[in-house]
Image (tube, coloured by chain):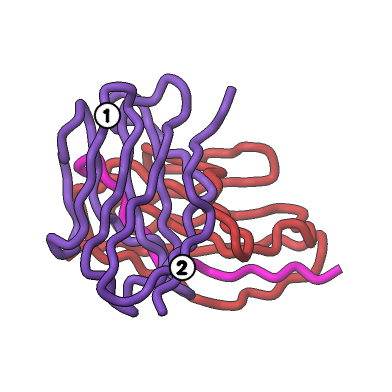
Chain colours: A purple, B red
Amino acid sequence: DAGVTQSPTHLIKTRGQQVTLRCSPKSGHDTVSWYQQALGQGPQFIFQYYEEEERQRGNFPDRFSGHQFPNYSSELNVNALLLGDSALYLCASSSGGGNQPQHFGDGTRLSIL
Amino acid sequence: QKEVEQNSGPLSVPEGAIASLNCTYSDRGSQSFFWYRQYSGKSPELIMFIYSNGDKEDGRFTAQLNKASQYVSLLIRDSQPSDSATYLCAPWGYSTLTFGKGTMLLVSP
């Protein structure tokens, strides 16, 4: 039984570029949440998707957007990249519409030059 | 603004000792509380969760919750060097988790 999978594992971009990160939830999970974790900090909630809609959103600008597909997989898109966007991006999935413990993927390490 | 406070540490304990990790939170609407362990360079791993006031034990781990004091803790008995990691406290409410910065635990042989 595969857990949460994320791709790519590492990515290097330059300022102003756009990036798309991908996440496949654990089997049986229908809710996907995205987090940004800067070095030395706890994960910060970006947004959550359920039934292909953004259900909750944290304090992140509109440059951060996402999508959930009918198979529950999800994408995180970030436009106009800034140096401060360098971080570990974590995807977590859960079941029951998000009312169950969240399980994390291994993350995507994004570096902005 | 939901806030979660944890002592950043490091908390150093010798092998075999009890490690006590503490967390306070601001949102009284938080319904349940999760503890995650994160090894350096890795993603968070769920180790415990607790919904009700009191204690919950799972192996060497005990989570304690006091909603009136807005306080949650994690005790690790018989600490092992492999327990050395950052422990993240995360209250859950309104379908989302709010994480603290985490406490680094170092267990020396």
Q: Is A55 left or right of B67, judged from the image as shown? A: left
Q: Please provide percent x and percent y for residue A72.
A: 32, 27
Dot 1: element: loop
Foreground label between 1 and 2: 2
Q: Is A110 left or right of B38, judged from the image as shown? A: left
Looking at the image, is mark 1 or mark 2 earlier in the sequence? 2
The magenta segment is B93-109
Residue in view at x 47 percent, y 55 percent? A108
Q: Is B80 left or right of A65, judged from the image as shown? A: right
Q: Which residue is mark 2?
A: A12
The one of A67 and B8 positioned closer to us in this rendering: A67
- Whether B82 is drawn above or below B63: the answer is below
Residue type (three-letter) at the residue carrying disc 2: Ile
Residue type (three-letter) at the residue carrying disc 1: Phe
Residue in view at x 39 percent, y 60 percent? A43
Q: Which residue is mark 1?
A: A69
